[in-house]
């Protein structure tokens, strides 16, 4: 009886060891997938920023869910979704002299399965529509991205002025 118990315990140990070895062997594949997703989200944030700076709002909105929410840099209440009228309003602002020359700094992405959190700063200058000159602008951003059948999409953004170094 003791021999059978020892044999069963050693078989269980072998099975646990096999699972451990398998998990260790597959873990680089998971990290490789994570790295690719993180690189994609970073590229999306940079492309989003470039499109916004250049006033290409149709392209910018391609990175977002239509139902996305945002706490804007103005400190106003949360904005829910966007419409064709929102795109047109943004285009009209650009025609009336609005300029944005902001760069992304310190972009970090944390991945949590099919959800990712991007954090970064946007620093540079902005000029409001109708304003005479550009002014310095410094913001901090948090973006919540979700994986969809169409790729990673921005679901929520929190934007606020960076008031201290």
Image: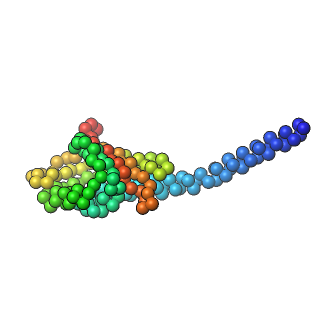
Q: How is the image coloured?
A: rainbow
The residue lying at 67 percent from left, 52 percent from top is: 22
> Measured from the top left, where is residue 111 in percent x and y?
46, 48
**39 versus 161 height, above or below:** below
> Measured from the top left, where is residue 86 in percent x and y?
23, 56
- In the image, taking residue 79 as reference, residue 32 lies left or right, namely right
Q: Quadrant of residue 9?
A: top right
> Measured from the top left, where is residue 45 in percent x and y?
35, 54
- In the image, taking residue 31 as reference, residue 70 lies left or right, namely left
- In the image, taking residue 117 as reference, residue 81 lies left or right, namely left
The residue lying at 64 percent from left, 53 percent from top is: 25
**48 versus 17 height, above or below:** below
Q: In which quadrant will I find the N terminus?
A: top right
The residue lying at 53 percent from left, 56 percent from top is: 32
Please tell me which residue lies in front, 81 or 91: 81
Q: In which quadrant will I find the C terminus?
A: top left
- In the image, taking residue 87 as reference, residue 12 lies left or right, namely right
> Measured from the top left, where is residue 77 in percent x and y?
25, 42
The residue lying at 27 percent from left, 55 percent from top is: 82
Please tell me which residue lies in front, 93 or 31: 93
Q: Quadrant of residue 6?
A: top right
């Amino acid at each position: 009886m003791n021999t059978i118990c020892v044999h069963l315990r050693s078989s269980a140990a072998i099975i646990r060891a096999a699972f451990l070895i398998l998990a260790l062997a597959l873990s680089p594949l998971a990290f490789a997938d994570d790295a690719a997703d993180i690189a994609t989200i970073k590229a999306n944030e940079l492309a989003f920023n470039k499109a916004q700076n250049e006033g290409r709002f149709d392209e910018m909105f391609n990175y977002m869910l239509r139902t996305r929410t945002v706490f804007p840099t103005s400190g106003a209440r949360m904005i829910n979704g966007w419409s064709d009228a929102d795109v047109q309003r943004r285009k009209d602002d650009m025609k009336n002299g609005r300029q944005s020359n902001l760069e992304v700094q310190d972009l970090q992405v944390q991945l949590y399965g099919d959800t990712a959190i991007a954090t970064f700063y946007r620093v540079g200058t902005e000029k409001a529509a109708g304003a005479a000159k550009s002014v310095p602008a410094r913001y901090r951003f948090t973006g919540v991205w979700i994986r969809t059948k169409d790729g990673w999409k921005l679901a929520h953004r929190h934007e606020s002025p960076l008031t201290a170094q």
